[in-house]
Image (tube, rainbow, N blue to C red):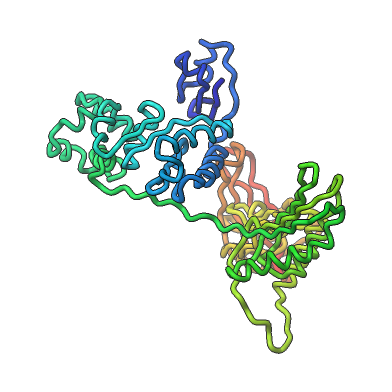
């Protein structure tokens, strides 16, 4: 079995199973080439983004052993266990505990402990499993490893191979002055000599682990199972808002979970248009989301968690009693969305496109705040016709809009105009042969202003004579 991802010339292998590795199949090979040799190959799609998210979660979970852990690329975790190993009976006992608990999660591991971050990474990936390396043993432990253990780029690795430096031991034997002249142009993160010095402890390589995420959670434990959660929501909302007030944060996404006595649990998510920590508002939203929750034989635990929070500073209400209009609109959006559904309440969002009919799209109102219109939109009419309506040219002038045209069986005489504004086809989206447009802002004799465009130009090789369309009407 292999996992596949898109490549330059078709799907390629992203990762392989143990059996596939024993057959000599490796990452980077084309799927069609491998299937020709191994007809029983089973292919599944890879999910690199999902793998990274899982690894981030596992790195946070690994803080049960030490306070500083961080994801190491796309396939590893670095843990700073200085001062923590004795809590588990020493480094060897800690490694056994780590291996056992990862196996309980269905994950296999290659573990190594070393005085430096670089040495631990090398020994875990290229050394024997469960390696314990002391400060005086670093050079001996990493000497047999290939230079690829430095995780350098392929070109630098090939250069070292041509120089006969296939292992780290050989690299350490070569005089540094000669090699430094050859590699001094490389950045520190890819320079093999700098990486080797970090692994040997001659240069610093600190671990920059992210801080623990703050989890805002309120819970209510019940002495006896109950069926109706509504009487307990008020206390949950008050407790959660009190916690967020201490950190000056507001909730954007809530999750209410009930834990049934039979071991099952049910949850409901509530999104908000803008950050809020108003208990009354949160309570109204939660009450409308309880329909359809099956309490079973009852539940004895409820939790309310703020899954996503945003800074929300403390503020004072208006002294004259005026209400914040934006807060009223956000509260209305929240209640409508909770009642009708996320996709039922939407507003316009602007997207990058030169074509007028593509710059606006509908998005869920709780997804993002509506962005300001691009500057170019200010010179375009607010009212567009969808689709543009063709006009009949009665009298044309060279290199300009029609002097007289008919639209919806009414003739118009052009008094003045401005333009053209040329918009070329979007080659990455439009089909071949799509013609360019020349837009004109036209004012007719009765004062009305239109937005006309000519589709195509004479001799462009993409059709017959150009055609004229009315796309918008100015206020």
For image coordinates 61% across by 67% down, the residue present is: 249
- Quadrant containing the C terminus is bottom right
**Position of residue 176 in the picture relative to residue 457 (left or right):** left
For image coordinates 63% across by 55% down, the residue present is: 359
Tell me: residue 12, above or below residue 195.
above
The x and y percentages for residue 474 are 70, 67
User: Residue 50 versus residue 33: which sits nearer the camera?
Assistant: 50
- Quadrant containing the N terminus is top right
Q: Quadrant of residue 360?
A: bottom right
The x and y percentages for residue 50 are 57, 39
User: Residue 349 versus residue 68: which sits nearer the camera?
Assistant: 68
What is the total number of numbered labels drawn onto the structure image? 0
Tell me: residue 357, above or below residue 459.
below
Q: Quadrant of residue 471?
A: bottom right
Tell me: residue 330, above or below residue 74.
below
Q: Is there any visible trace of residue 463 in the rendered image?
A: yes
**Position of residue 15 in the picture relative to residue 260 (left or right):** left
User: Residue 447 versus residue 330: which sits nearer the camera?
Assistant: 330
Tell me: residue 429, above or below residue 470.
above
User: Residue 344 versus residue 40: which sits nearer the camera?
Assistant: 40
**Position of residue 253 in the picture relative to residue 90 (left or right):** right
**Position of residue 180 in the picture relative to residue 312 (left or right):** left
For image coordinates 24% across by 41% down, the residue present is: 197
Query: Hey, which residue is sitting farthest bottom in the picture?
Result: 320
Q: Is there any visible trace of residue 385 in the rendered image?
A: no
The x and y percentages for residue 414 are 68, 65
């Amino acid at each position: 079995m292999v996992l596949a991802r898109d490549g330059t010339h078709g799907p390629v292998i992203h990762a392989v199973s143990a059996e596939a590795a024993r057959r000599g199949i490796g990452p980077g090979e084309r799927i069609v080439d491998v299937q020709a040799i191994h007809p029983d190959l089973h292919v599944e799609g890879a999910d690199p983004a999902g793998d990274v998210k899982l690894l981030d979660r596992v790195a946070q979970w690994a803080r049960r052993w030490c306070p500083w852990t961080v994801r190491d690329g796309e396939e590893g975790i670095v843990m700073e266990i200085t001062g923590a190993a004795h809590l588990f009976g020493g480094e060897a006992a800690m490694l056994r505990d780590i291996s056992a608990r990862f196996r309980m999660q269905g994950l296999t591991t290659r573990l190594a402990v070393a005085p430096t971050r670089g040495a631990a990474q090398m020994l875990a990936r290229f050394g024997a499993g469960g390696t314990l390396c002391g400060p005086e043993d670093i050079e001996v432990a990493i000497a047999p490893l290939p230079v690829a253990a430095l995780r350098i780029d392929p070109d630098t690795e090939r250069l070292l191979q041509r120089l006969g430096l296939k292992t780290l031991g050989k690299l350490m034997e070569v005089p540094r002055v000669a090699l430094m002249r050859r590699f001094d142009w490389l950045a520190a993160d890819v320079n093999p000599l700098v990486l080797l010095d970090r692994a040997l402890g001659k240069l610093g390589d600190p671990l920059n682990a992210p801080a623990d995420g703050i989890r805002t959670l309120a819970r209510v434990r019940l002495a006896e199972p109950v069926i109706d959660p509504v009487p307990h929501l008020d206390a949950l909302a008050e407790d959660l808002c009190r916690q967020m007030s201490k950190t000056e944060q507001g909730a954007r996404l809530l999750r209410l979970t009930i834990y049934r006595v039979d071991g099952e649990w049910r949850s409901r998510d509530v999104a908000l248009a803008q950050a809020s920590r108003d208990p009354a508002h949160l309570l109204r939203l939660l009450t409308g989301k309880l329909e359809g929750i099956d309490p079973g034989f009852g539940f004895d635990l409820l939790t309310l968690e703020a899954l996503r929070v945003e800074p929300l500073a403390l503020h004072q209400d208006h002294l004259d009693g005026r209400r914040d209009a934006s807060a009223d609109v956000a509260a209305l959006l929240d209640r409508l969305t909770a009642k009708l559904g996320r996709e039922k309440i939407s507003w316009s969002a602007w997207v990058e496109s030169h074509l007028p009919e593509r710059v606006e799209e509908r998005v869920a109102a709780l997804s993002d705040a509506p962005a300001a219109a691009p500057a170019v939109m200010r010179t375009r009419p607010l009212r567009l016709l969808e689709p543009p309506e063709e006009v009949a040219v009665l009298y044309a002038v060279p290199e300009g809009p029609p002097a007289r045209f008919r639209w919806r069986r009414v003739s118009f005489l052009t008094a003045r105009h401005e333009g053209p504004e040329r918009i070329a086809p979007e080659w990455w989206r439009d089909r071949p042969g799509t013609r360019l447009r020349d837009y004109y802002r036209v004012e007719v004799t009765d004062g009305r202003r239109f937005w006309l465009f000519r589709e195509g130009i004479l001799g462009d090789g993409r059709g017959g004579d150009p055609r004229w369309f009315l796309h918008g009407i100015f206020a």
